[in-house]
Image: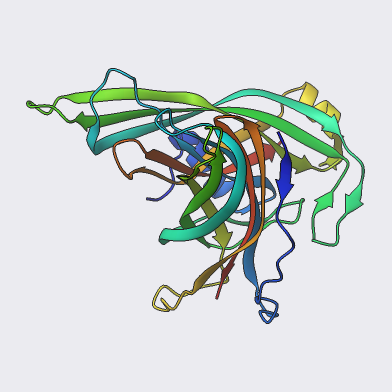
Amino acid sequence: MTNKKNDLVIKNYCSYDDIENFKQLSKNFKVNILISNPEILDVIKDNVFIDIVEHKIVPSPKGKSLEGISLTSNMLIIYLDINTKFQYISLLDECSVHTISSIEPCIVSIPLDDFSLSNLGININTFVEDVFYSIENSRQIYVNVTFLVTVE
Amino acid sequence: MGFSFKDKKLQEELSTKTKQLEFFTLIDNCSRVYLPFNSPSPVSINSSTLDIDVISVKLIETPTAYSFEGQNLSGNKFIIDLKITEKLLYTGLSQCENVFSVNNTSLIKSIYVVVPKEYNGKSICKIARTNNFLVTPIVLDSKIRLVDKDNVFSYISLLVNVTLF
């Protein structure tokens, strides 16, 4: 089985210079091909996008850790769904093309500035920076998604 | 959802002694809940209970470094193993709407908290040897989400605080 890595794609979020609240995350998971679908030979195309399901502000203790993490009294909790869709060539004799999709949950907590709850203008953006996938076996694909979550 | 302290003593200790937390780390954990094969498909989630146990704590030595990102390594770390047990009650798809439960106990997390080499004139090795520390996991937020009959997601946001004496 072959390992494939996407080409470097330059995203257009470089204009966001003055972001203060952000988090860089890397999430790995496995996508299983159902028994009803044929086995995989090679992946043709991948499509990964992130949905923001819900966000909420919860109180948290204050402090600055020795490691460098700062906590303010408000923490923004964001629930995300990582949607992956792969288009693949099957192992069948006719080499037919099929798709497999899956959803992977993710949670991000970002400490906010001293924030008044009356100010509810929160804008959350997610940027998929890199998608790495590798075919583990004929029914499993290992996926690693690197992404950035910003809050304005 | 607010804080979920395990008992009142810890809550008082956190509120009085450590107004500003010093040694802590934040972890976000999310996982897929696997329902038993024979049980019916879930219709709705009724309730969930979360219990966090500290399995083991050990002290290790690390290099002393400061990264460009802002991460600081002081030279010592506590490696803390947590076992997160989640019990879920759900209504199954059946004529009489039976209630089922499932235990999601496979969540074992290994995390680290950076601690100083000395605290109040005592070396961290002595503090670790004499058990003069307290590990407090605090649940900031947790949620169970039923996407469809095959996908039940569990989200947990945790703050693990270490208090040295």
Question: At 12% from the left edge and 29% from the top edge, which residue is drawn?
Answer: B97
- Left or right, B116 with respect to B96, comes to right
**Quadrant showing the N terminus of chain A:** top right
- Left or right, A25 with respect to B33, comes to right
Res. B163 in view: yes
Res. A61 in view: no
Nearest the eye: A43 or B117: A43
Colouring rule applied to residues = rainbow
- Left or right, A50 with respect to B131, comes to left
Q: Position of residue A79 (x, y in %)?
A: 45, 54
Question: At 40% from the left edge and 50% from the top edge, which residue is drawn?
Answer: B2
Q: Look at the picture and state if A67 lies above or below B82.
A: below
**Quadrant showing the C terminus of chain A:** bottom right
Q: Position of residue A32 (x, y in %)?
A: 51, 34
Q: Look at the picture and state if A90 lies above or below B57.
A: below
Nearest the eye: A96 or B43: A96
Residue at far top of view: B38
Residue B92, located in which quarter of the rendered image? top left
Residue at far left of view: B96
Figure label count: 0
Q: Position of residue A48 (x, y in %)?
A: 54, 56
Residue at far front of view: A94
- Left or right, B91 with respect to B47, comes to left
